[in-house]
Amino acid sequence: MSTQTDRPRIVDQGEPAPLPEPRGDASAALMKALSQPGGHLPDLPEPTDDPLTGEDAALALYLCYELHYRGLEGVDDAWEWDPGLLAHRQRLETAFEDRLRDEVGRLPAGFDLAEELWALAAGAESPDALSARMAREGTWSDLCEISVHRSAYQRKEADPHTWGIPRLAGEPKARLVAIQSDEYGEGITEEMHAGLFGLSMQGMGLDPTYGAYLDHIPGVTLSTVNLISFFGLHRRWRGALIGHLAGFEMASVAPMRNYATALRRLGCDDWTCLFYDTHVVADAEHQYVAVELAESLVTQTPAMKADVLFGASALSAVEGMMSSHLTDCFGAGRTSLRLPLDLPPAPADR
Ligand SMILES: [Fe+2]
Ligand SMILES: [Fe+2]
């Protein structure tokens, strides 16, 4: 039985993300520019690969967004609001948004919002879902790779949705704050969900350092993070941000339970599973608060209804692309990561 006194700790001093290696001409030119003091952005080439699944495109946008989180090692903070860089980011975002709209397709007309949100989330309960397969037969290597993929978002969990708070008022604001407060452990450092994910990585023998695996994480996964940053950083997308959060919370309980089952089957201890156990309990409640949040926003601002559904649909689309990538790679016996992972020993082999 685990007690607080034997609780492992992770060290996180808020360091910026390490600079990754470039993945093509666009990310290489961007990183070269960022290595200079802010304010002198040369003409930069735009990525030529797919804005959602391409390595160069996803990394370039990810780097622009990272300036608004912890920043990048050795990069001048002045770049965050540099007009030239913002204009470049906007070009990347236009390509990203166009591709996203193609992927999401046409939204239904005259829909019931809660019904549509629950329908989108229903796939998470399927026995064919990736998490359900991991619970039954996932290998140590599969679980380690999934943890590395998820670290791109989970080590900054909740932060992009928090940008929604100053943009809302009244009931939707109160519902959002209620969810976010739990995500940040109600102010208890050790309970912050982003930290609990770090604890899980450390328990698996992975490196919980913020951004440690950026070079390993493929574009299709970086796009799942770019999506939240895109919605979070633009006030005009606040409806989609709330739809995204609702989709996340409503499709969480079954996968979290499945991953906890998978890790325990492979011999992981309670601390390593705490992130997942915590979400099984927290999101059982958050999913309903999230529906109230989405519905109260639409009651307040009916014109936002389509945006809310777009946000949840976009989440479903990009998560589906990532899951397909993982499923294909695991099925073919090849790594799902951009670089092969130096696999830590499984608990049974330690
Ligand atoms: Fe969480
Ligand atoms: Fe949650």
Image (spheres, rainbow, N blue to C red):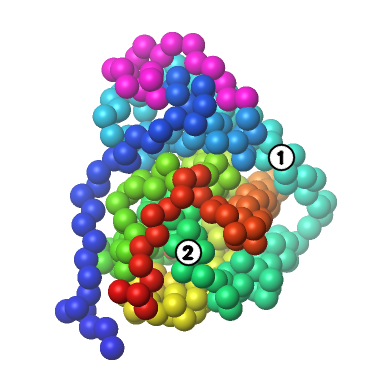
SS label for mark 2: helix
Type of secondary structure dominating the magenta stretch: loop
- Using the rendered view, name the quadrant where residue 126 is placed: bottom right
Place residue 191 in its image quadrant.
bottom left
Q: Quadrant of the N terminus?
A: bottom left
152 or 248, nearer to the observer: 152
Q: Name which residue type carries label 1.
A: Arg
The image position of residue 155, as x and y in percent, is: 37, 54
Q: Where are the magenta residues, as a range?
A: 31-48
| Comes first in the chain, label 1 or label 2 | 1
Which quarter shows the C terminus?
bottom left
Q: Residue at x 49, y 35 (%)?
A: 59
Identify the residue position indicated by label 2 in the image.
Answer: 141
Task: Give the crowd class for mark 2: few <14, some 14-19, many >=20 residues within 10 Å.
Answer: some
> Viewer-proximal residue, 320 or 156?
320
Q: Is residue 146 above or below residue 32?
A: below
Side (left or right) of 8 relative to 79: left
Relative placement, left or right, of 305 versus 280 is right
Q: Return the residue at label 1.
A: 101
The percent coordinates of residue 30 (x first, y second) are 44, 22
Residue 282 visible in image: no
